[in-house]
Amino acid sequence: MTEQVAWVGLGNMGRGMVRNIVEKYPLQSPLIINNRTFARTQSFAATLPSSKVAPVATLEEVSAASIIITCVADDAAILATIESILSYSPSPTLFIDCSTVHPSTTASISSLVTAAGHKFVAMPVFGAPAMADAGALICVPAGPRSSVKLALPIAHAVGRAVIDLSDKPYESASTLKIIGNTFIVNMVEQLSEGHVLAEKSGLGSEQLHKFIEAIFPGVYTDYSNRMMTGVYYTREEPLFAVDLARKDARHAMNLAETAGTRLENVETADRHLVKVKEYSGEKGDIAAIYGAVRQEAGLPFENQKKGE
């Protein structure tokens, strides 16, 4: 029987992951791709070889696949997606979920999938959209070892490393992902505070940026560049949307409260994300924490003069 793979969700990360599956995974038939908005599915499919992808408008068409990979925005979306696919009574299928959701949500969807007779792997990924494009994500699969083994070829197609949580509870992958994302939130908060202090003290952001480039190459430098160049407020489509960043922060703070501890740095960053949402709406980016910190220090939210 020919293996059929389907992908659901075409956000910034999803598009890069799909490109790498098309290029690197030994597809036996065109990859089924689906997004909530079919026009987006069609426009993205047009950027890929027509023989390699099959855009579909409904989850009923997705349910025919033997491997179904989901990467959607939030907890409500993944629950609705899984419930919809299962309502079509698909044949025994491997579900791989790459969404960033609360561990309790992962536990819920894994129960739904396995109770219906399917295999499930929770496999959130670490990395920015540029890493997704480059096939350089870090994949975190959890679940029965036999199921994780089936998911690893997908992980190797989209990622450069795997943190294998085989035989760990499904929700352990989501726990690691949520805690890991607090490092990103805290990094952006610290960069924002540092750049504002450098500017207000007279040192200048340029000098601080040189330090960051020398000591923290990679993601720190990338985010510093987004602040320095004004990308944090000029992009029409955010690289890490404020609503998603706040969702991750809320999940992390909830985990901490349940465990009897606190994430005070995350609490501070979330307060600034509220200001980002007020200023920029849904197109606000996590890097715009910089703008919120600037405002608190008596500087304009935007660090560039109009027309620069």
Image (tube, rainbow, N blue to C red):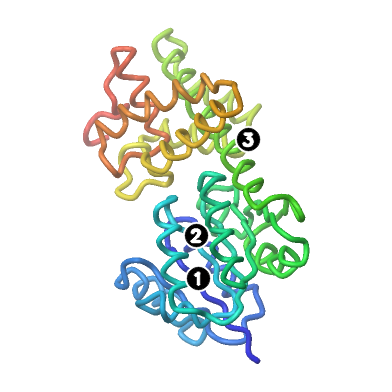
Residue 166 is drawn in which quadrant?
bottom right
Depth check: give the residue in front, 71 or 142: 142
Can you tell which mark lies on residue 71? 2
- Classify 238 as above or below 295: below
The furthest residue to the front: 115
Can you tell which mark lies on residue 251? none
Tag in front: 3 or 2: 2
Tag in front: 3 or 1: 1
Q: Does the CB distance between marks 1 and 2 fall below 8 Å?
A: yes
Residue 260 located left or right of residue 58: right
Q: Which residue is mark 1?
A: 7
- Give the secondary structure at mark 2: loop
Residue 243 is drawn in which quadrant?
top left
Can you tell which mark lies on residue 217? 3
**Whole-Å distance between the Cαs marked 1 and 2?**
8 Å
Q: Residue 155, how many percent across, how many down? A: 67, 62
Residue 121 located left or right of residue 99: right
- Give the secondary structure at mark 3: loop
Q: Answer yes or no: is residue 164 visible.
A: no
* Amino acid type, label 2: Cys
- Classify 69 as above or below 301: below
